[in-house]
Image (spheres, grey):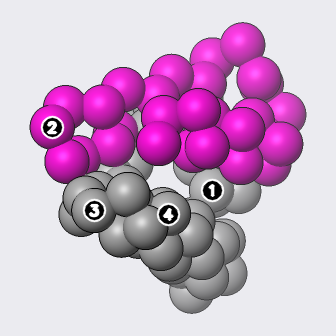
């Protein structure tokens, strides 16, 4: 799952070197530069909701239940 989230987040941000994705059990934590947090969240949270939906569908296919969190 971390590869999927890393691929999506890296495509959205400007500072690709500062992207960090870590998995701790069923929680995937994403760290990005302060300038890029808005690009990950999107207007009214639409982008992060979409990322969470994709991860939820992919993890359900593998019999898991992962969630995505943004670490500031």
Q: Quarter of the image holding residue 38?
A: bottom right
Between marks 4 and 2, how big is the CA–CA gap?
15 Å
Question: Cα distance, mark 1 to mark 4?
Answer: 19 Å
Give the label, 3 or 1, closer to the camera: 3
* Left-right relation of 1 to 6: left
Q: How crowded is mark 2: few (under 14 residues within 10 Å), some or many (20 or more)?
A: few
Badge 4: few (under 14), some or many (20 or more) residues near its Cα, within 10 Å?
A: some
Counting from the top left corner in percent of width and height, residue 60 is at: 36, 69
- Identify the residue at horizontal 84%, vertical 34% (top origin): 14
Q: Which mark is residue 63?
A: 3
Q: Nearer the viewer, mark 3 or mark 2?
A: 3
Answer whether residue 7 is visible to the viewer in this image.
Answer: yes
Mark 3 vs mark 1, CA separation in Å: 26 Å
Contact flag, marks 3 and 4 (Cβ < 8 Å): no
Q: Does the image show residue 52?
A: no
Name the residue nearer the viewer: 52 or 32: 52
Stretch in magenta: 1-29
- Nearer to us of marks 1 and 4 is 4
Element at badge 4?
A: helix
Please name the residue shown 62% across and 56% down the image: 40
Comes first in the chain, label 1 or label 4: 1
Q: Earlier in the sequence, mark 3 or mark 1?
A: 1
Q: Toward the viewer: 32 or 60? A: 60
Q: Provide residue 25's location: percent of width, then percent of height.
A: 15, 37
Q: What numbered label is drawn on residue 50? A: none
- The image quarter in which residue 22 lies: top left
- Please, is residue 3 above or below residue 48 in the view? above
Q: Which of marks 3 and 2 is nearer the N terminus?
A: 2
- First-in-chain label (3 vs 4): 4
Q: In which quarter of the image is the C terminus?
A: top left
| Labels 4, 2: front one | 4
First-in-chain label (1 vs 2): 2
């Amino acid at each position: 799952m971390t590869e999927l989230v890393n691929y999506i987040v890296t495509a959205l941000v400007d500072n690709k070197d500062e992207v960090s994705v870590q998995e701790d059990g069923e929680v995937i934590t994403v760290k990005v530069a302060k300038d890029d947090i808005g690009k990950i969240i999107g207007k009214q949270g639409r982008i992060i909701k979409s990322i969470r939906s994709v991860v939820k569908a992919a993890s359900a296919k593998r019999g898991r239940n992962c969630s995505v969190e943004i670490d500031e």
